[in-house]
Amino acid sequence: MAHTIAGISLYFQHNIQVMNRLILFSGILGVLLTSCGNEGIHHVRAHTKELQVMRLDTLGNATTVAVLTERGEIRKALSTISSAEAPTYKCGYDYELRCINEQDKAVVIHLNSDELCAHASFLYKGELNACLLNKEGLEYLKGLSQ
């Protein structure tokens, strides 16, 4: 009888260790999958030397263009894009940000400022990233394009 109880106790201890490992692994995987390309947006912010902000009409044509070269202004404009992952909306875009780095290569970020569809999307290292926007940054962008 004592042998059976010890066996059952050992069995439950092993299962609890396995469950704890699964929970830890699931948590780590969840953080990695919901990062919205944190690396991507942070890299773009850090390496943009010129930012072209374009307001788009309903046909996708640029109606106004602002070119930012001062580091503080670039940082403020790009702070519109949070690191939080956004759902992949099927909406049009009303802003386009061309982030030009030191090697004169551009990352193009498409923004939708509509409250129901507000997000940014861009390709980074061949992967599509969709991030939420913040209201203060959107107000700043709207001020640039007036």
Image: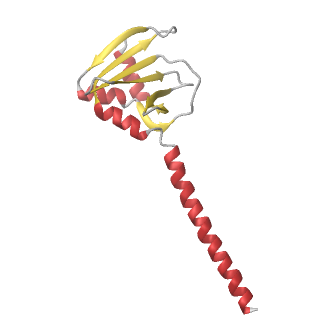
Q: Nearer the viewer, residue 38 or 104?
A: 104
Q: What residue appears at the point 29 percent right and 16 percent down from the top-left corner?
A: 67
Residue 17 coordinates in the image, percent (x, y): 59, 70
- Tell how many labels: 0
Q: Position of residue 47 (x, y in %)?
A: 29, 32
Left or right, 50 with reference to 109:
left
Query: Which residue lies most toward the left here?
Result: 70
Q: Position of residue 43 (x, y in %)?
A: 34, 36
User: Residue 59: x and y, percent?
Assistant: 51, 8
- Look at 52% across and 43% down and name the residue there: 34
> Nearest the camera: 72 or 17?
17
**Furthest residue in direction bottom, as rendered:** 2
Q: Quadrant of the C terminus?
A: top left
Q: Where the N terminus falls, by quadrant?
A: bottom right
On screen, residue 136 versus residue 58, left or right, reads left
Q: Nearest the camera: 16 or 76? A: 16
Which residue occupies 70% across, 84% down?
A: 7
Q: Is residue 131 above or below residue 52?
A: below
Instruction: Name above or below for residue 22 compared with residue 129.
Output: below
Q: What colouring method underlies this structural image? A: secondary structure
